[in-house]
Amino acid sequence: MIYREGLNLSLLNKKELFEQGMIVCDEFLSKNNIKPPIIIAKNFDNNVKEKGCYYYHDKIIHVNFSKCRLPVKTPGYSWTYPGYKADLTPMGVLAHEMGHHIDNLNNLYKLMPKTPKVSGYEPNDKEIVAETLRLFILNPDLLRIISFNRYKFLNERFVPVITQTWEEVLVNAHIKFKNTINKNFIK
């Protein structure tokens, strides 16, 4: 599993983060009997082997590594960490794009509860679903804390693969990430 003991996501490079994202997304699709996409995301360019094209089973996944970021070791203006509410790592981008795929198959955007944002990127109903699914795939317990109604909506339809608490998922994140969750969302 992605958050197995001893795996420190903050030490991984972009390719390794992408590979970990592939593992959890593939497991999520399999566990929920969802057909994987043939191609996901947009046609991105970057400077990685095979231009960022990764062949995984029978699908092709594209992630723009030049726009993805590594986990922030010391939070500041632009925070990002795998499984956090703001996640611009290759793992987060992949889970977000997988959210679009799942939404396209299920038309969730018509049904998703309208609640306060779970991330800073929710300009329309399609992005609301993708961001919510990203968090449900990578850290469902954090989604439960931040937006119980969205968590409940997805949990009634899908089985999460990450069973750890949000604190266990963010175990190697800077303490400011955890303090922000405790301060802003836990009563």
Image (cartoon, grey):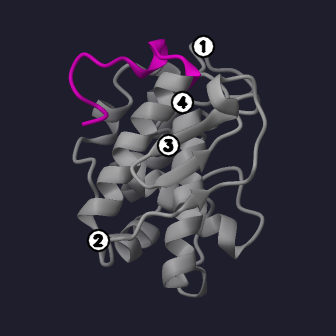
Q: From mark 2 to mark 4, how far is it between C-alphas?
A: 28 Å
- Mark 4 or mark 1: name the one nearer the start of the chain: 1
Say which residue appears at 47% left-offset and 16% top-offset: 12
Residue 4 shows which numbered tag? none
Mark 3 or 1, closer to the camera: 3
Determine whether the residue tagged by mark 1 lies in a helix, strand or loop. loop
Camera sees residue 173: yes
Which residue is identified by label 2? 33
Provide residue 167's location: percent of width, then percent of height.
32, 33
Q: Is residue 109 above or below residue 170?
A: below
- Mark 1 or mark 2: name the one nearer the start of the chain: 2
**Predominant secondary structure, magenta span:** loop
Crowding near the residue tagged with mark 4, few <14, some 14–19, many ≥20 C-alpha atoms within 10 Å: many
Q: Amino acid at mark 4?
A: Tyr
Residue 2, magenta (yes or no): yes
Which residue is identified by label 4? 81
Q: How many marks?
A: 4
